[in-house]
Image (cartoon, rainbow, N blue to C red):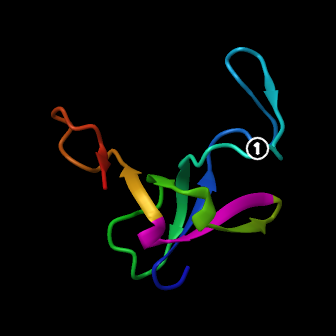
Amino acid sequence: MLHDRVLVRPEGPEGDRRTNGGILIPDTAELSRRCIWAEVVAVGQNVRSIEAGDRVLYEPEDRSEVEVRGVLYVLLRERDVHAVASERVGDGSGSTGLYL
């Protein structure tokens, strides 16, 4: 990875989704803008606050998809990440593990 780039693997199911009530929503349906959680796979040398293994929250419109060996990854800039959930943040005394 170069500069301020972050390579992430999106969490959650790909394709069709099903609501709690059992309604099937096709993957082509336009949903409200929702941020997505992803696991960080690799980071560039200029990334300051994110490490591999962290979970990050990003907006789906701010992404570039890339497929490596049949696995879909998303390439982001560090500034496109909205939040990081990490075990290493804080000492665990009442901290949520989230920081912006």
Is residue 86 toward the left or the right of residue 40 in the image? left
Is residue 80 toward the left or the right of residue 25 in the image? left
Q: Position of residue 94 (x, y in %)?
A: 18, 32
**Label 1: few (<14), some or many (≥20) within 10 Å?**
few
Position of the C terminus, as image quadrant, is bottom left
Q: Nearer the viewer, residue 29 or 80?
A: 29
Residue at image location 36% in from the left, 48% down from the top:
86
Furthest residue in direction bottom, as rendered: 3
At numbered mark 1, what does the secondary structure look like: helix, strand or loop?
loop
Query: Exactly how many numbered labels are in the figure?
Result: 1
Q: Which residue is mark 1?
A: 14
Is residue 11 toward the left or the right of residue 21 in the image? left
Residue 59 located within the stretch drawn in magenta: no
Position of the N terminus, as image quadrant, is bottom right
Q: Position of residue 77 (x, y in %)?
A: 50, 74
Residue at image location 30% in from the left, 43% down from the top:
97
Residue at image location 81% in from the left, 36% down from the top:
16
Q: Position of residue 22 (x, y in %)?
A: 77, 16
Q: Nearer the viewer, residue 62 or 68?
A: 62
Furthest residue in direction top, as rendered: 21
Kind of residue at badge 1? Glu
Q: Nearer the viewer, residue 41 or 5?
A: 5
Is residue 11 toward the left or the right of residue 79 in the image? right
Q: Nearer the viewer, residue 80 or 96?
A: 80
Specify the quadrant of the image occupied by residue 32. top right
Residue at image location 39% in from the left, 64% down from the top:
50
Q: Position of residue 88 (x, y in %)?
A: 29, 50
Q: Main secondary structure of the magenta part?
A: strand
The part of the chain drawn in magenta is 71-80
